[in-house]
Image (tube, helix red, strand yellow):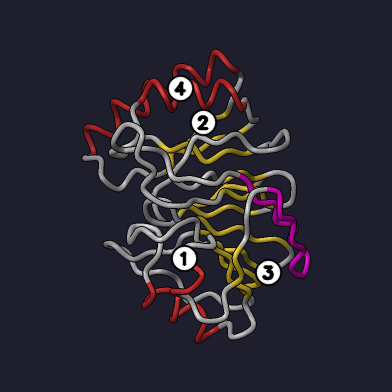
Amino acid sequence: MKITKLEHSGLVVENNGAFVICDPVEIVETLPALENVKAVVITHKHSDHFQPDVLAKIRANNPDAKIFTTEENVANISGATAVVDGDIVNVEGFDLRFFGANHAAILPGVIPCQNIGVVINGAIANPGDSFDLPPEKVDFLCVPISAPWCKVPESLEYLKSVRPKYAIAFHDAILSEFGSMISNNWLKSTSVDLGVDYRVLKPGESMVI
């Protein structure tokens, strides 16, 4: 499978010429005009993960694409399907297993909104805005590295808990170039000790697992 990092927490997974997209947004870069998109996963309703105009562009090229999101957000997306922790869906060659329930807290004790993570084909885990553990051992992990709800020690603990073969820096658009270097140096150092291949992909860059 080919994995392409988009901006911030955007991800494209390609398998045999078909695609699943997670949380596509346009902040600086423009999303590629992909065809043969089988599914789009919107982890939650926040605008750095869900932009209706961007989703509309994808659907214009892929009218049969299935859209999956939280129960809370499904009313905002015509034709979308709500998914919850434990749901498993097969979409034309992609097995999607959903996990988690809530966005990580920003203010202590306050849940900002619902959040749903996804494991794609039993190998690639995207937790959305959470540190929820995937329900199975995975080869590849998206690691959030910076957010109002996230600090580096939490990212390190998440990486240690999951221990995938590969990991990439995720949820990183709010960092400056210097800040990104500092955060990722900590993750890289820990990854070496854990035997994890940790990478920092720029928007549009890809890797194959």
| Three-letter amino acid code at the position of disc 3 | Ala
Look at discs 2 and 4 and give the one toward the viewer.
4
Q: CA distance from mark 2 to mark 4?
A: 12 Å
The numbered disc on residue 18 is 3
* Residue 56: percent from left, percent from top: 44, 81
Q: Which mark is residue 156?
A: 4
- Residue range of the region highlighted in magenta in the rendering: 86-99
Q: Main secondary structure of the magenta part?
A: strand
Could you tell me the amino acid type at mark 4?
Leu
N-term-proximal mark, 2 vs 4:
4
CA separation in Å, label 2 and label 1: 32 Å
In front: mark 2 or mark 1? 1
Up/down of 179 relative to 66, above or below: above
Return the disc, 3 or 2, that comes first in the chain's sequence: 3
Q: Give the residue displayed 57% in from the left and 80% down from the top.
A: 79
The residue indicated by pointer 1 is: 73
Q: Is residue 70 left or right of residue 50?
A: right
What residue do we see at 68% from left, 36% from top? 139
Badge 2 marks a residue whose secondary structure is: strand
Q: Residue at x 48, y 45 (%)?
A: 102
Comes first in the chain, label 2 or label 1: 1
Given the image, on which type of amino acid does mark 2 rest? Tyr
Residue 82 on image: x %, y %: 59, 65
Residue placed under numbered mark 2 in the picture: 198
Quarter of the image where one finds residue 183? top left
